[in-house]
Amino acid sequence: MNRMKIISASLLFLLVAATADAQRAVWSFRQCLDTALLKNITVNQSRLVNEVNRVDLEQSKAARIPSLSASVNEGLNFGKNIDPTTNVFVTQSYNSTNLALSSSLNLFNGLQNRNTIKQRKIDVEAGNYDIETARYNITLSITTAYLQVLFSYEILSTAQSLVEATTAQADMTQKLVNAGKLPESNLFQVRSQLATDKLSVVNAESQLAMAKVSLMQLMEIPVSDSFDIVRPEMEEPPYPLLPSNSQIYQTALQVQPQIASASLYSKSALMGIRISEGARYPRLNLNAGLNTNYASSRKTGTAVNPENYPFFEQIWDNLGQSFSLGLSIPIYSNRQIKSNIDRAKINAETIQLTEQNTKNALRKNVEQTYTDLKSAMKKYEATREQLAATELSYRNAEKKFNVGLINAIDFLIEKNNFTTALSNLIQAKYNFIFQQKILDFYLGKEIRF
């Protein structure tokens, strides 16, 4: 017993340790994306909706197979009744049994079964694209959140570097003040800047924590302080050779799943019109039946010397078969058929408008992304030049401040200009990268880091 307790405790410890290691794991972009795709509610809902489409397809296929049903009726009769086996009046109490087996097959119904199967196949295919659309959307969301975490890390790193630089500057200023080369007011100004820089670190840490929370929530995992991501080296983004706006749109039309889904739903709606029109045609059904019965009142032999008629002998002797061919011709249905056709046509027009709206939305998104990418390229180039200029000015001011040629206020103005330019460059860099990823997304390329 003690040994079992030790084994159980060991297994529990290993499980807890494994869980803790999993919580401390550093997540790559691919791991974040795979987890989100696995747990995302919208993706799973789309998958379940398409499972219903598959069930509907199987049901429509089964409509081509003959139906088969069986029935059993047991009765107890008192007083004057008709013997179901002889159709003769009897005045005694008796029990009766009726067994029946029936089958029906639709031979023709205006091709409604055939067209319904076609429609269901289209719906299943469209449902597959709906699942892919949901996956695309979560991929875009994870990409945005992952980049936001990387951006927040870089902002934090920059803020920490500025604190180190300002701390060193404060130490240098303290020495210069002690040596009488700078007034004490300069030291107060530098220490004030150091406090501001430390506050920037706190704000950057808060921004990073919120970015991680957003990413974890998109992944549908509990928020954990130990969560972290792989931080790839985000080098200077290359300048892509952009195709024309129309070329990007035409490519997106071919690869974006929401376009294929909308097109298939339009085909399904047109098939719905044909299904509704099929109700105008005659319906031809083949029916078959097998029945028998038993009554305890029925006897064999003579009236003077009657004998019991066994159950199974009666069942076999009373066995009957039937076959029938039925033709139903719709003449007037209180406008139900025409109304159904009109509804199907209106539904088809509505879905076709939805398809066009989906294409228009894609075109607008591509145009916006194309414009944003070109603007991001220009802004990134401009901020690089701005940073180079402000850094030279800042380094020059730092040298002058260290030898007492300028006061702390003038120096800190140059330092803040440099800090602002550095922050602008980081923002421009990540915006440039993000817009490139979005363009790759519309071109159907896999997003990687």
Image (tube, grey):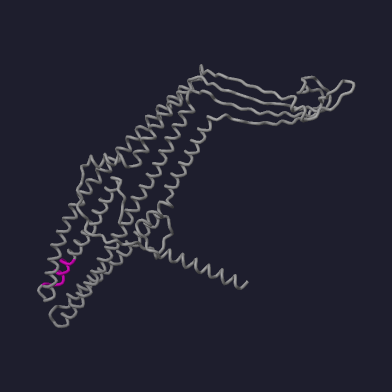
Image quadrant in which you'd find residue 201: bottom left
Q: Is residue 265 above or below residue 398?
A: above
Residue 414 inside the magenta-drawn segment: yes
- For the question of whether residue 151 can be seen, the reply is yes
Spot occupied by residue 190 in the image (x, y as percentages of width and height): 20, 73
Name the residue: 72% across, 28% down. 98
Name the residue: 9% across, 74% down. 405
Q: Magenta segment range?
A: 406-415
Query: In front here: 336 or 299?
Result: 299
Name the residue: 45% across, 44% down. 47
**Quadrant location, the N terminus:** bottom right
Q: Is residue 69 above or below residue 371?
A: above
Q: Is residue 89 above or below residue 415?
A: above
| Residue 418 horizontal side relative to residue 299, left or right | left
**Quadrant location, the C terminus:** bottom left
| Residue 90 horizontal side relative to residue 423, left or right | right
Spot occupied by residue 433 in the image (x, y as percentages of width and height): 25, 54
Image quadrant in which you'd find residue 417: bottom left
Spot occupied by residue 360 in the image (x, y as percentages of width and height): 29, 37
